[in-house]
Amino acid sequence: MGVKGRYQVRKAAGQYWLLDMKQSGVKRLEYVLLNESGAYIWELYDRLQSETDVAEELHREFGISVKEALADVRQFLKQLAEQGIVFE
């Protein structure tokens, strides 16, 4: 499920943009706009590579239950998949 190198978050004008860095050709996928929470979850997932590890980090950082954090992470990843973000 590695995402490092392919997708990168960029911040510009107060917005977070998820960009596919390995696209080629004329037909390119649009960027995905993320809010600050989404960008943070993305960064954690990119580093930790595990839904459970990300949920545990969110639990430690924000004091929410691991169960709630895991549901949030899974929902976020589902939304990305619906927008065509491919995990290798």
Image: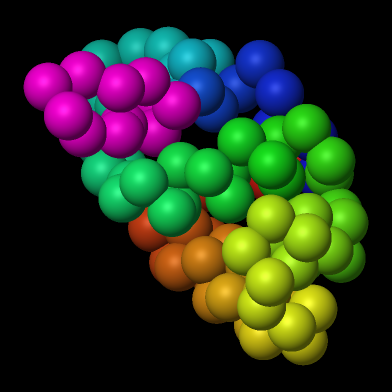
Quadrant, the C terminus: top right
Magenta-tinted stretch: 9-19
State the residue at coordinates (87%, 56%): 53
Horizontally, residue 61 falls left or right of residue 77, namely right
- Is residue 74 something that shows in the picture? no
Horizontally, residue 10 falls left or right of residue 21, namely left
Q: Is residue 57 magenta?
A: no
Quadrant, the N terminus: top right
Horizontally, residue 26 falls left or right of residue 3, namely left
Q: Nearer the viewer, residue 29 or 57?
A: 57
State the residue at coordinates (38%, 58%): 83
Q: Quadrant of residue 63?
A: bottom right
Tell how many labels: 0
- Is residue 18 something that shows in the picture? yes
Q: Nearer the viewer, residue 33 or 81?
A: 33
Q: Nearer the viewer, residue 58 or 71?
A: 58
Q: Quadrant of residue 48?
A: top right
Q: Work out whether 52 lies above or below 68.
A: above
Q: Nearer the viewer, residue 80 or 26?
A: 80
